[in-house]
Image (cartoon, rainbow, N blue to C red):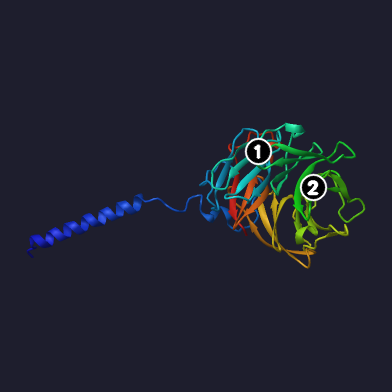
Amino acid sequence: MTRSPRWILLAVLAVVLSVTVGVVASSGKSHSSSDDTKAGTTSTPSHEGSGRSGDKGGGGHGKAGSVFTIPGDTVFPEGIALDKRGPGKTIFVSSTTDGTIFKGSTKAKALAPFAPGGADGRASATGLTVDRGRLFVSGAATGKAFVLSTKDGSTLKVLDSKPTSADTFINDVTAAGGFAYFTDSRQPVILRASTSGAAVGDMERWLDLTGTVFAYQDGFNANGIVSYEDGRVLVVVQSNTGKLFRVDTQSKAVSEIDLGGKTLTQGDGLVAHGHKLYVVRNTGEIVEVRLRNGERRGEIRKTVTSPLFAFPTTAARDGGRLLVVNSQFDKRAAGQPPVLPFTVVSVKKP
């Protein structure tokens, strides 16, 4: 059959258009990168040390899967606090190695040194919290805590726990109801300092846990601490047993939170949000606990793991995501070099 020149021309144009579209489609960028929520999927518990702290992600900008880098080869970070005041949001992260405090923006990709380690005896730093322009820093084995200015990192006050022995570890802190409360993982005591005035008060050994249901054992005991009901109730995790405890700050009554027979061993940092409690476990997961009956009962609801986790310790809530610190403590304990850079990663809340 004879084909007209016009028909042949149309056929050639169709072939060219098809090839062009195929090339464009195959060369386009995929949007399922590490900024995707794959890094925050709900799953069964992961194995310890399975996280990859070297994954780059996409930086800040409020996305799940974002990665914030921390400079330094031996940082081994632990605590995190988020300051939501002002036009932007500021991240603070602590170094256990020398007490350096790092600072960065949630819109940036990297943190930078803010308060140098060693200042005023701050040789190590763990848990952090922000309260009215002040950064409260737990001083780990120093037996002290430090109050820094969030503006310039200067030391406003050094708090001395006056431990009864050298075996002390000021681990975490929460501020609410006019007080900052601190845990000691080695000594059975909850410490506190007044924050209601213009100046922070001295640290006192506020609650002796000896003889209560919160029985100290070998290893790390009281660790993460958060407050509920405007500071009327404290919730504390005991890392070595995996138990949660409720402390009434008015009566000083201590009770174990009923988890239905379940435990959260290696529970570290805690994040409170409404009736929910997020427990960061060193095993490489974050567990959502639904608190009921005035924080007396808890139901384990969901678990989040991520390939970005590398021995996570603590977290801070930023809207619909959690900013999680990768400590790599397992590397240090094994005498292995860390995977650089050290990171804070974000995952979607459960």
Relative to 219, 111 lies left or right: left
Residue in the image at 61% along x and 58% along y: 349
Question: Regarding mark 1 in the picture, which secondary structure is present there?
Answer: loop
Of callouts 2 and 1, the N-terminal one: 1
Task: Estimate the x, y position of residue 222 in percent, counting from the top left.
Answer: 80, 49
Task: Estimate the x, y position of residue 44 in percent, counting from the top left.
Answer: 64, 57
Q: Between 175 and 20, which is closer to the camera in this rendering? A: 175
Regarding residue 309, the answer to whether it shows in the image is no
Residue in the image at 57% along x and 44% along y: 68
Quadrant, the N terminus: bottom left
Q: How crowded is mark 1: few (under 14 residues within 10 Å), some or many (20 or more)?
A: few
Quadrant, the C terminus: bottom right
The numbered dot on residue 142 is none
Q: In this view, does 165 lie above or below 309?
A: above
Regarding residue 15, the answer to whether it shows in the image is yes
Task: Estimate the x, y position of residue 100 in percent, counting from the top left.
Answer: 68, 35
Q: Between 217 and 116, which is closer to the camera in this rendering? A: 116
At label 1, which amino acid type do we have?
Asp
At label 2, which amino acid type do we have?
Phe
Residue lying farthest to the right in this orientation: 211
Residue lying farthest to the front in this orientation: 198
Question: Regarding mark 2 in the picture, which secondary structure is present there?
Answer: strand
Quadrant location of residue 127?
A: top right
Cα distance, mark 2 to mark 1?
Answer: 23 Å
Q: In this view, does 303 lie above or below 147?
A: below
Q: Name the residue under label 1.
A: 152
Task: Estimate the x, y position of residue 277 in percent, counting from the top left.
Answer: 71, 59
Residue lying farthest to the bottom in this orientation: 293
Q: Which mark's residue is nearer the viewer, 2 or 1?
A: 1
The numbered dot on residue 182 is 2
Q: In this view, does 269 lie above or below 333?
A: below
Q: How crowded is mark 2: few (under 14 residues within 10 Å), some or many (20 or more)?
A: many
